[in-house]
């Protein structure tokens, strides 16, 4: 009996959510336009700048089958249809999809459908799409509806297919502040964790999952408003099953916490002679260096990190700050930026995670080791962390072999030790406060980790290298 009542309550809550969203959009789309869709007085300007940016983030879809969820009046429908083999454009508001069809109905490769993506009656064949595209849809669904739709999307996609979506996070970015706004402004980590956990088992017993290709802030809004607009690109890939963890998940759950060594950032940034307006690529962690360079030097910063956890912290710290920073989850060994995209590249303690024969393209600080064979204990630590450590001298030689000139390689271990001691002392003094905010496990993890580093440095095993290199003109 209790189960039956729970089911009734669950269904009632879903119906209430659909009614709330339907009434909201009926009220605010009487005269559908770009302004009413974007809920912003600057909509025409933002659309002109934003639409090409969003489309540039999509994977190749020429001749492919595309499903557009929440298509609205068709801000993206026509552009998608120019390259796609077929587009299924869907929206639950009849007047919006009707206007979309009035504008784009002459394009023979689009089917227009008035349908609610949460409806059990929605019939889309399995493995029928190469790309699912959604802009500002999931934030109009309850958590249960988002979870249900995510499971359906992975079913609709063919193996190797992609899902792209963009959402407003934290709070609204628009300047039209409607009353009774039912939008769900979630943290980006909610969407990331949900898609990471989504799997499907095919009839033959094989598993598929979503692999994160890219997650970043929408640059148009970073430049004009804030970092609250976030987009994701995921790929449906074969999986060994739901229990297998990726290296990225290792970074998120085992390697890092919410503390960052910041004392040396000012000194290192001064070494770079940054100028206002320069474009800087930063291995960002939780964003300390990014904020400093943007706020103190008026630099345009792109902060990249493989760890979703780190980027989530950085996005949360950006709330209320006026800074031009685009945060992006990505693998520096896989992302291909256009040639000459950056004036400066700044990386701290990053390259040690990468197995390299030629160092990727600067200022670098990184963990190093003493020349010779490491002790059994240190070798075990290196293996457990999956680090690729070199001596300071070898590291400098790698940069030279990669084509950099004016390479300066410096042993900064003494400075590293002083920073660790200060951080350790400050954290131990704030032990109770730290545990209250995080946990005792986090506290012990950080403190014991720093003590181990200090011991390895005292034993002349672990080193810290500082490197400056220049690209030939």
Image (spheres, rainbow, N blue to C red):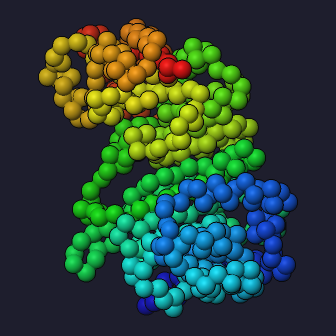
Quadrant hosting residue 379: top left
Give me the residue at 57% from left, 13% from top. 271
For the point 72% across and 76% down, the residue is 73
Q: Is residue 73 left or right of residue 281?
A: right
Residue toward you, 236 or 187: 236
Q: Nearer the viewer, residue 436 or 108?
A: 108
Residue lying farthest left? 376
Image position, residue 69 (x, y; %): 58, 75
On screen, residue 286 above or below 241: above
Measuring 28% from the left and 34% from the top, which residue is drawn there? Answer: 355
For the question of whether residue 441 can be seen, the reply is no
Is residue 223 positioned above or below 472 on the image? below
The residue at the far front in this view is: 473
Instruction: Name the foreground residue: 105 vs 30.
Output: 105
Vertically, is 171 above or below 247? below
Q: Dividing the image into 4 quarters, which one contains the N terminus?
A: bottom left
Residue at image point 37% right, 66% down: 160
Q: In the shown orientation, is residue 366 left or right of residue 80?
A: left
Tell me residue 265's x, y (percent): 56, 20
Number of numbered discs visible in the structure rendering: 0
Task: Point out residue 190 in the picture as x, y percentages from the top left corner.
Answer: 51, 58
Quarter of image, res 143 = bottom right
Residue 3, image x and y in percent?
Answer: 43, 86
Q: Quadrant of the C terminus?
A: top right
């Amino acid at each position: 009996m209790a189960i039956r009542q729970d089911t009734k309550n669950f269904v009632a809550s879903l119906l209430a959510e659909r009614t709330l969203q339907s009434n909201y959009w009926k009220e605010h789309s009487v005269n559908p336009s770009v302004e009413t869709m974007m809920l912003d007085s600057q909509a025409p300007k933002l659309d002109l700048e934003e639409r090409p940016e969003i489309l540039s983030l999509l994977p190749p879809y020429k001749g492919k089958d595309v499903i557009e969820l929440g298509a609205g009046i068709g801000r993206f429908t026509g552009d998608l249809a120019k390259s796609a083999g077929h587009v299924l454009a869907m929206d639950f508001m009849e007047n919006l999809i009707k206007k979309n069809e009035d504008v784009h109905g002459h394009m023979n490769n689009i089917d227009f459908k008035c349908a609610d993506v949460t409806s059990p009656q929605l019939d889309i064949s399995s493995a029928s799409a190469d790309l699912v595209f959604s802009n500002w849809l999931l934030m109009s669904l309850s958590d249960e509806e988002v979870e249900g739709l995510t499971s359906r999307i992975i079913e609709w996609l063919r193996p190797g297919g992609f899902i792209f979506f963009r959402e407003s996070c934290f709070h609204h970015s628009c300047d039209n502040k409607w009353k009774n706004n039912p939008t769900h402004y979630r943290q980006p980590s909610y969407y990331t964790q949900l898609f990471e956990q989504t799997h499907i088992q095919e009839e033959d017993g094989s598993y598929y999952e979503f692999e994160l290709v890219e997650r970043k802030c929408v640059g148009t809004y970073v430049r004009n408003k804030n970092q609250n607009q976030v987009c994701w690109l995921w790929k449906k890939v074969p999986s060994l099953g739901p229990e297998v963890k990726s290296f990225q998940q290792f970074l998120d759950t085992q390697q890092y916490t919410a503390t960052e060594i910041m004392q040396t950032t000012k000194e290192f940034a001064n070494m770079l002679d940054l100028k206002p307006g320069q474009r800087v690529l930063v291995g960002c962690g939780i964003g300390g260096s990014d904020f400093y360079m943007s706020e103190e030097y008026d630099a345009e910063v792109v902060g990249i990190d493989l760890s979703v956890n780190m980027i989530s912290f950085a996005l949360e710290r950006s709330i209320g700050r006026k800074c031009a920073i685009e945060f992006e989850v990505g693998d520096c060994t896989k992302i291909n930026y256009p040639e000459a995209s950056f004036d400066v590249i700044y990386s701290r303690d990053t390259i040690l995670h990468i197995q390299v024969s030629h160092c990727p393209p600067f200022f670098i600080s990184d963990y190093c080791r003493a020349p010779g064979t490491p002790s059994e204990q240190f070798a075990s630590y290196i293996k457990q962390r999956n680090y690729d450590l070199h001596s300071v001298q070898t590291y400098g030689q790698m940069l030279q072999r990669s084509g950099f000139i004016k390479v300066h390689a410096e042993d900064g271990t003494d400075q590293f030790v002083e920073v660790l001691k200060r951080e350790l002392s400050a954290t131990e003094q704030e032990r109770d406060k730290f545990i209250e905010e995080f946990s005792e496990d986090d506290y012990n993890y950080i403190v014991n980790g720093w003590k181990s580093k200090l011991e390895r440095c005292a034993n002349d095993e672990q080193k810290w290298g500082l490197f400056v290199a220049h690209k030939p003109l």
